[in-house]
Image (spheres, rainbow, N blue to C red):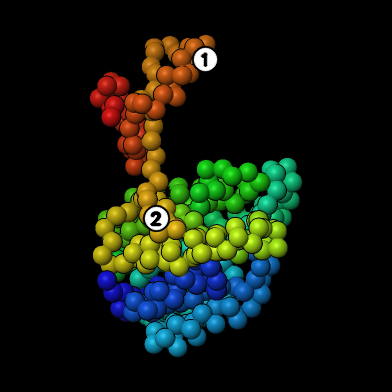
Amino acid sequence: MSLKDQVVIVTGAGGGIGRAAALLLGRLGARVVVNDYGGDTAGQAGDIGRAQAVADEIRAAGGEATANGEPVGSVRAAEKIRDAALAAYGRIDALINNAGIMAIGEVDEISDALLDRVIEINFLGAFRLLRAVWPGMKARGYGRIVNVSSSSLLGFGDRAPYGAAKAALIGLTADAAFNGKPHGILVNSLLPAAFTRLTNGEAGGADAIDPAMWEMLREKFAPEFVASTAAFLVSPKLSITGEHIVSGANRVARLAHFETAGWRKPGLTMEDIALNIAEVRDTRRGAFVASGQEELALFMPAPEAVVV
């Protein structure tokens, strides 16, 4: 498969998954806008050096790339990243919303400032960049967008702002996919399992981990194992949209929404729910739902019509 001449923006591409994806895209013939603000995992900005190093590496291998050091988050930053891609290559075929920062602590320990910064970068920045490239994709009748989410949305403990922002990307993906499909814009989420600066920092760094465990994590969950999935999700060959793809350690899967068949009774009361909560939660009967419309349909027919 080739991505020859496809113009792809990759945010947070100075290291980890973003870097691995950018390098692979370059090898596959894409023209890559390598965006990275050069800062730390807590949102403190640096410089364009990290992005420039990756762009140089792509060019040294015979590919095309341009570096961009805008910090993802604000409306203005989204516009400047979009404009830099258009100035360099004339159009935007794909966007990988990968930039993100981490906040560690129980829900009552996270400051308002850090909470705002995580939501701004991890969610609003992605939303604003998607919105910035959307009109051009819509006008051309073609686009590929990947929102890099995380299994943290399922809950790990001590990372509520991060998990909440990543869960918000799932909602953004689902709704944007619904709107984008008639215009040839396919939008999917990527939930990576990779050992990066974020995961290493969560564990306290290499010095805080058993050396054998650190080496196992570094090798088994190398970011390069996620790059192929990211490349596929921006490929012209792609046909799926609105889906949430898990990738890492040489494994690819789909995370899907499942709703139990539930329990019904006219005049439902709180006591009824308490007495029948086991049936409400019973996963032996139910249906997968891919959209709000499909979920709404579960309220309409008789229960047996939606059981799988």
Q: Amino acid at mark 1?
A: Ala
Question: How many tags in the picture?
Answer: 2
Asked where in the image residue 116 lies, by quadrant, the reply is: bottom right
Decide which of tag 1 and tag 2 comes sooner along the chain: 2
Q: Nearer the viewer, residue 61 or 234?
A: 61
The percent coordinates of residue 306 (x first, y second) are: 28, 27
Q: Which mark is residue 131?
A: none
* Up-down relation of residue 258 to residue 146 (above or below): above
The percent coordinates of residue 232 (x first, y second) are: 33, 64
The percent coordinates of residue 220 (x first, y second) are: 49, 60
Residue visible at 69% across and 55% down? 114
Residue beneath label 1, please?
274
Residue visible at 59% across and 70% down? 71
Q: Where is the N terminus found, in terms of image quarters?
A: bottom left
Residue visible at 35% across and 71% down? 93
Residue beneath label 2, please?
251
The percent coordinates of residue 74 (x first, y second) are: 58, 64
